[in-house]
């Protein structure tokens, strides 16, 4: 199973708290990457690729966990997880390419530092 992860810190000036605006921004980024949101709460989103274009084993699941600021950390942190059922036998596989695209879109659209 291929699995790629990243931790992203939002600049303090972007979002001061977890709210519907942040969740909506992340949802729009995922939908712009041609993904379907299958679960959404204030601090957790799950999206999947739409079937039909690639093999079933290559279909990826994307999770975004949103961690609020705490006494130890003043910024909101996003954890991005992209995974599928295909073994990552090559460095340039479908899951890696999708992870790179989503990561870049989050960095660009949400201004992650």
Image (spheres, rainbow, N blue to C red):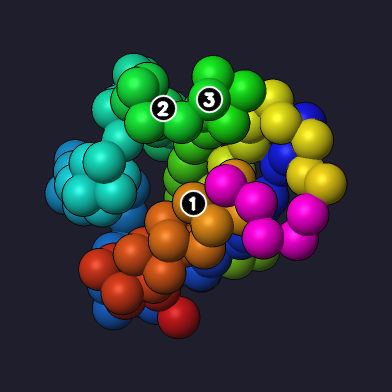
Q: Quadrant of the N terminus?
A: top right
Q: Secondary structure at mark 1?
A: helix
Q: Quadrant of residue 84?
A: top right
Question: What span is colored magenta in the figure?
Answer: 90-94
The number of discs equals: 3
Q: Is residue 69 left or right of residue 6?
A: left
- Badges 2 and 3: C-beta atoms under 8 Å apart? no
The first of marks 2 and 1 along the sequence is 2
Mark 2 or 3: the one toward you: 3
Q: Is residue 95 magenta?
A: no
Q: How far is disc 2 from disc 3 in space, using C-alphas? A: 14 Å
Q: Which residue is mark 3?
A: 55
What's the distance in space between the residues labelled 3 and 1, CA to CA?
14 Å
On the rendered structure, is 2 left or right of 70? Answer: right
Q: Which mark is residue 48?
A: 2
Do labels 3 and 1 touch, CB within 8 Å?
Answer: no
Residue 43 tag number: none
Residue displayed at 32% across by 54% down: 17
Q: Quadrant of residue 82?
A: top right
Percent position of residue 36, x then y: 28, 28
């Amino acid at each position: 199973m291929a699995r790629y992860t990243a931790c992203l810190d939002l600049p303090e000036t972007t979002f001061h708290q977890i709210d519907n605006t942040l969740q909506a921004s992340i949802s729009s980024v995922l939908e712009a990457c041609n993904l379907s949101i299958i679960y959404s709460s204030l601090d957790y989103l799950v999206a999947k690729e739409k079937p039909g274009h690639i093999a079933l084993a290559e279909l990826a699941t994307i999770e975004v966990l949103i961690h609020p600021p705490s006494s130890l950390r003043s910024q909101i942190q996003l954890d991005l997880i992209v995974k599928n059922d295909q073994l990552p036998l090559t460095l340039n596989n479908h899951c890696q390419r999708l992870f790179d695209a989503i990561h870049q879109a989050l960095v660009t659209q949400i201004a992650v530092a």
